[in-house]
């Protein structure tokens, strides 16, 4: 099986542990390599298990972190994000052709990080007496993939630089609340995820800027325009230190917060 066929097989795999195993085994050829054209029928919905049941985001129940059940619910939500992030990174590899070899290496490395994150979270869920799929979840992340399916520039803007960057903003608060709840096991995993997600957002910034340069566009006004066109608003607080490491400038972050709501 060639590398892109193996990426597609991992993307299509519905069983989470099997998907993670497939992703861990993926490798691209050394140096530059030919990128095959994508089949006419594209991808469709990626492989995912029958559970969790997918519901509207507003219907996902919120629980306090003072109980094991509440902490398991939070952990399940993060695991669902990471599972979708595996598919998003694989989709970025499979869907968008004609990019430099480094693009595919970057996004394959992201998929492998996300698979490892999901495996860690699944193990922690088991320790709390829960399994991925036991609780409902929403489909917002994959809906973002569908919305950006026709343009890698839009994908780099709205997925890593909005959705994943939001994880940089909110994870420190989760870490603080779980520390106060005495859940050191979950905190340790979230610290790993937070550190590694900085690189993922930086990869999105790198290829967003690459595509802007290719099209003769200025990155910062282009990013602001895309957010306005798609009615995306970024709410405080921002994790400024992590966002700086991921390629956001202070003026850009100030503009995000000053945008009309």
Image: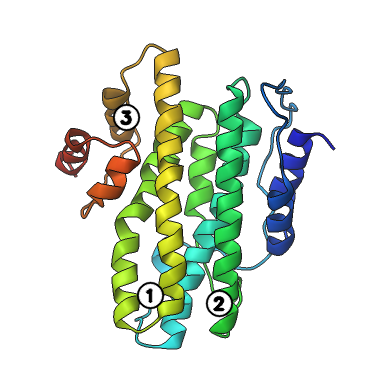
Mark 2–mark 1 distance (CA, rounded to whole Å): 17 Å
In the displayed structure, 117 sits above or below 134; it is above
Which of the two marks, 2 or 3, is nearer to us in this view?
2
Look at mark 2 in the image and give the residue it sits on.
125
Look at mark 1 in the image and give the residue it sits on.
62
Image position, residue 9 (x, y; %):
76, 45
Does the CB distance between marks 1 and 3 fall below 8 Å?
no
Which residue appears at 34% of the width and 51% of the height?
166
Secondary structure of the residue carrying tag 2 is helix
Which residue is farthest front?
30
Look at mark 3 in the image and give the residue it sits on.
223
Which residue appears at 62% of the width and 35% of the height?
93
Which residue appears at 38% of the width and 75% of the height?
62
Q: Is residue 239 left or right of residue 160?
A: left
Which of the two marks, 2 or 1, is nearer to us in this view?
2
Q: Is residue 99 left or right of residue 66?
A: right
Which residue appears at 70% of the width and 28% of the height?
30
Secondary structure of the residue carrying tag 1 is loop
Mark 1–mark 3 distance (CA, rounded to whole Å): 32 Å
Looking at the picture, tell me which residue is in the foreground, 195 or 114: 195
Mark 2–mark 3 distance (CA, rounded to whole Å): 37 Å
Looking at the picture, tell me which residue is in the foreground, 259 or 128: 128
* Residue 110, picture quadrant: top right
Residue 232 in sight in this render: no
Looking at the picture, tell me which residue is in the foreground, 219 or 103: 103
Q: How is the image coloured?
A: rainbow
């Amino acid at each position: 099986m060639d590398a892109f066929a193996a990426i597609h097989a991992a993307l299509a795999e519905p069983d989470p542990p099997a998907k993670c195993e497939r992703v861990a085994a993926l490798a691209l050829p050394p140096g530059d390599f030919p990128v095959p054209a994508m089949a006419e029928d594209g991808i469709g919905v990626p492989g995912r298990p029958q559970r969790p049941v997918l519901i509207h985001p507003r219907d996902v129940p919120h629980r306090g972190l003072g109980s094991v059940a509440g902490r398991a619910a939070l952990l399940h939500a993060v695991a669902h994000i990471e599972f979708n992030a595996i598919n998003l990174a694989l989709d970025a590899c499979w869907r968008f052709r004609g990019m430099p070899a480094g693009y595919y290496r970057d996004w394959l490395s992201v998929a492998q990080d996300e698979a490892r994150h999901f495996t860690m979270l699944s193990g922690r869920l088991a320790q709390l007496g829960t399994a991925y799929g036991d609780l409902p979840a929403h489909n917002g992340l994959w809906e973002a993939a569908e919305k950006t399916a026709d343009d890698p520039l839009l994908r780099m803007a709205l997925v890593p630089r909005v959705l994943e960057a939001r994880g940089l903003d909110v994870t420190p608060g989760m870490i603080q609340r779980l520390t106060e709840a005495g859940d050191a096991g979950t905190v340790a995993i979230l610290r790993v995820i937070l550190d590694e997600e900085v690189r993922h957002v930086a990869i999105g910034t790198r290829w967003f800027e690459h595509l802007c340069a290719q099209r003769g566009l200025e990155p910062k006004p282009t990013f602001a325009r895309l957010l306005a066109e798609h009615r995306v608003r970024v709410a405080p607080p921002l994790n400024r230190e992590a966002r700086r490491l991921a390629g956001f400038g202070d003026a850009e972050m100030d503009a995000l917060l000053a945008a009309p709501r």
